Amino acid sequence: MFQPSKSQSQPPKAPGAGASLNDWLFWLESIHPTEIDLGLDRVLVVLRRIFRNKPKARVITVAGTNGKGSTVATLEALLRARGRRTGAYTSPHLQNYNERIRVDGQDVDDATLISAFEKVEAARGSVTLTYFEFGTLAAFVVLNDAGVEDWILEVGLGGRLDAVNVIDPDLAIITSVDIDHVAFLGDNREVIGFEKAGVLRPGIPVVLADMDPPRSVIQQAVAQKVMLARVGKTYTIEEFAGSTGELGFTLHVQNQAIRLPAGPLPVPSVAAAAVAMLTLEPDMPIVSIEAALAKVSVPGRFECLGRKPDIYVDVGHNPHAARWLSARLKALKGVSRKVHAVYAALADKDVEGVAHAMAPAVDHWYLAGLNVPRGLSSEDLQTKLGPCELPTVCAQDSVARAIEKARGDAGPNDIIIVFGSFFTVAEARLMLL
């Protein structure tokens, strides 16, 4: 499945003194022959040169197919409400690379990132690292230098062979397991689950948010004798209708009931973060947990960027994420509103599966081209979706033009959803913010 990387005879020269963050990022894209080269050996060599011992901070690793960013943001908010100093590492970013690393809830500045890049470059010697691996090690440097108490680390791809996994966690969360990144992780949930479960360590607490986790995950949890909190067994999520008809959710865990917000984040992710918080800080008052949860939001996750019509953006890019998004839209639209979907995707995604998942909620489709590496043109996307027989399809060459067309067609009470990838949402946010 994985091809070994090939050595480069003349590696590019690192940026010198006075280089900008953009100079470094441009250089990082050229230092390894492949964009993705899963494996821990090279990263471990450099890690050991930078850190003699495991960082003193408490480490929480978050893996899963969908909902990782929401889980990280929720746990980060809870820990900060507790008075803990936090560092968070997520990927990818929407507008600026700095978004990937947060210290005490704030994106790091360019100077801090450049300093971390310089330390990684000094340590790596002749070892080749991918863009993501180099950035992950730089994130570790930033968080260590900041002296935060908790590191919350989002796995980039898979788990077992992801660069984030070179640090042993004190607690792990697996949000969901579904089909994505087939070329690297496999084409079924059991194989993918084995990769996700690679973040587990013997005896540590683990929170599973997937209602139906693959056997491979449970087998790894049993084999490593982890302290497993599992939805539907260790904790439950109860749905109820409020006094005005809106949906609400209650988390039942450790003989306690916690009111969960109905949106904009996936409820399983929020619940998993709350369970993890009570595992880490069992005496945190429930009222403090509920207050912190009510304020959490994540850019690009069912984010509202306009009114009359309501315009939402979401980074969901696989069928699992699309099913969640479809359910949210159906609940919002009721019987009188129309949903106009602007969809742009990357070529390696299951666009037919996404379209089928979204179809019950969408009345009008606007297929947009993505002018990025691996981006589908609107024509290619339309061809791929031909068998889906979508209603009222309109093709535009860019996300911005598709949004303009949808705005023109939508009534003031309608809903526009822009989704399909981080690139899709990034283009929409540049236009709408």
Image (tube, rainbow, N blue to C red):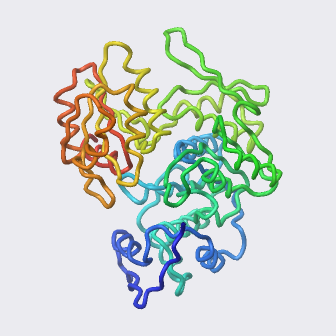
Q: Is residue 20 above or below residue 15?
A: above
Q: Is residue 7 above or below residue 214?
A: below
Q: Name which quarter of the figure residue 48 lies in.
A: bottom right
Is residue 259 found left or right of 299 in the rendered image?
Answer: right
Q: Residue 104 at what x, y percent from top left?
A: 55, 51
Q: Give the residue displayed 53% in from the left and 44% down from the top.
A: 66
Q: Name which quarter of the figure residue 208 lies in.
A: top right
Q: Residue 313 at what x, y percent from top left?
A: 36, 38
Instruction: Tell me the quarter of the image containing the N terminus.
Output: bottom right
- Which residue, as the protein is rendered here, is positioned at the far bottom? 9
Q: Give the residue displayed 72% in from the left and 37% down from the top.
A: 230
Q: Is residue 308 above or below residue 266?
A: above
Is residue 88 found left or right of 299 in the rendered image?
Answer: right
Say whether residue 372 is visible.
yes
How many numbered discs, if any?
Answer: 0
Q: Name which quarter of the figure residue 301 lies in.
A: top left
Q: Is residue 105 above or below residue 141?
A: above
- Which residue, as the protein is rendered here, is positioned at the far top? 243
Say whether residue 112 is visible.
no
Instruction: Tell me the quarter of the image containing the C terminus.
Output: top left
Q: Give the residue displayed 52% in from the left and 33% down from the top.
A: 295
- Which residue, as the protein is rendered here, is positioned at the far front? 387
* Residue placed most toward the observer, 142 or 369: 369
Q: Residue 115 at what x, y percent from top left?
A: 48, 73
Q: Give the residue displayed 72% in from the left and 63% down from the top.
A: 56
Q: Residue 11 at what x, y percent from top left?
A: 41, 86
* Residue placed most toward the observer, 311 or 118: 311
